[in-house]
Structure formats: structure tokens, C-alpha cells
Amino acid sequence: MSTLMPFLALDQNCEHVQAWVKRQLTSAGFRVVETFDLQDARLAHSDCPCPHHGTDRCNCQMLVLLVYQKKQEKPATLVIHGQDDKTWLSLANPMGQRANQPLEATVRRVLLPLRTDTPAPVEVAAYEVRKVPARGSTS
């Protein structure tokens, strides 16, 4: 996979973001197929400590979703990475393959926080997560 550059960071746990992402994409007409779940994969390796938490009690999560638009054969690959009640969304492509830029742009548009039903607070991607003041707030 390519280097992951998040386009959206959320101050929400991964489980809530996963449900929201699937709801948003499905309601926009996409078909979403989950192909990897880190917590499910860890079940086979009980003696594997988390590199972030140093224990086997880990709340880190990584999900890989294939996002298909109508009958299109080549999906967008959406990666949801969660750790300590923070979640990042990234689009990835297999090495050596070109991105489906129109599809990826549409996925971003569906998920970016200009939509009123985005879990708050949010910050459009960067390398840090910042809280966005609630609407009508003076701070």
C-alpha cells in the first residue's frame, strides 16, 4: 500500500466512525466491503503486545474498506485507523497502480465535515487532531 495521508481526523472512537462512514457511503449509493479488521486479526496472536500501548489490552483499530461506485470494478480503498478515541480516514492504492481520482474525490466529498451530520468535533486532515468549536460558540 501507499503511504497513508489522512484526509479527515475525528475526535471519535473508531467504532462510531466506522458506523458513520458506512452509513454515509451507503446512503450516497456506494457499496462498502470490509476486507480487514485489526482486532479480528489480533485474535490469532494473543501474545502480541500493542506497539502503542505496550500491552495486549489495545484499543487500536485499523479497518480496510473497499468502496465501489455502482457497477464500477475498481474500488477506492478507504483505511480507518483508530487509537485512543481518535480516528483518521485515508485513501490508499496498491503500489504501482493509479488511483481512481474521480471516485476518491467523490468519497472525500461524501465524508468531509461540510455535511451537517458529521460526528463533531472534527478537523479536516493534517497531522494533528484539533477540536473545532461548536456552531454558534464564541471560542
Image (cartoon, grey):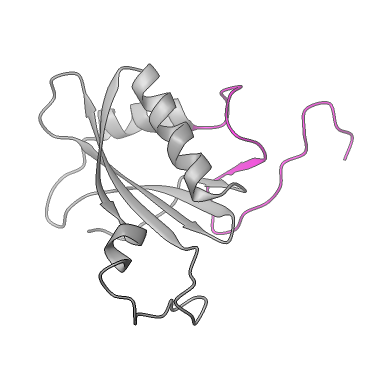
* Residue 12 percent coordinates (x, y): 59, 46
- Where residue 75 sits, quadrant-wise, is top left
Q: Residue at x 77, y 33 (%)?
A: 134
Q: Position of residue 42 (x, y in %)?
A: 32, 67
Q: Residue, x 50% and y 41% (percent of image)?
A: 17
For residue 39, side relative to residue 71 (left or right)? right
Residue 9 x %, y %: 54, 48
Left or right for 1, reference 108: left
Toward the viewer: 69 or 12? 12
Counting labels gives 0
Q: Depth check: 124 or 122 in front?
A: 122
Name the quarter where the N terminus is drawn.
bottom left
Magenta stretch: dominant secondary structure: loop
Query: Which span of residues is magenta-colored?
Result: 112-139
Which quarter of the rendered picture does the C terminus lie within? top right
Choose top left, top right, bottom left or bottom right for residue 40: bottom left
- The image quarter in which residue 119 lies: top right
Query: Is 88 rendered above or below residue 50?
Result: above
Is residue 116 a member of the stretch shown in magenta? yes
**Residue 61 magenta:** no
**Left or right: 75 as drawn, with respect to 24:** left
Q: Position of residue 135 (x, y in %)?
A: 77, 28
Residue at the location (34% across, 51% down)?
63
Residue at 15% over, 57% down: 95
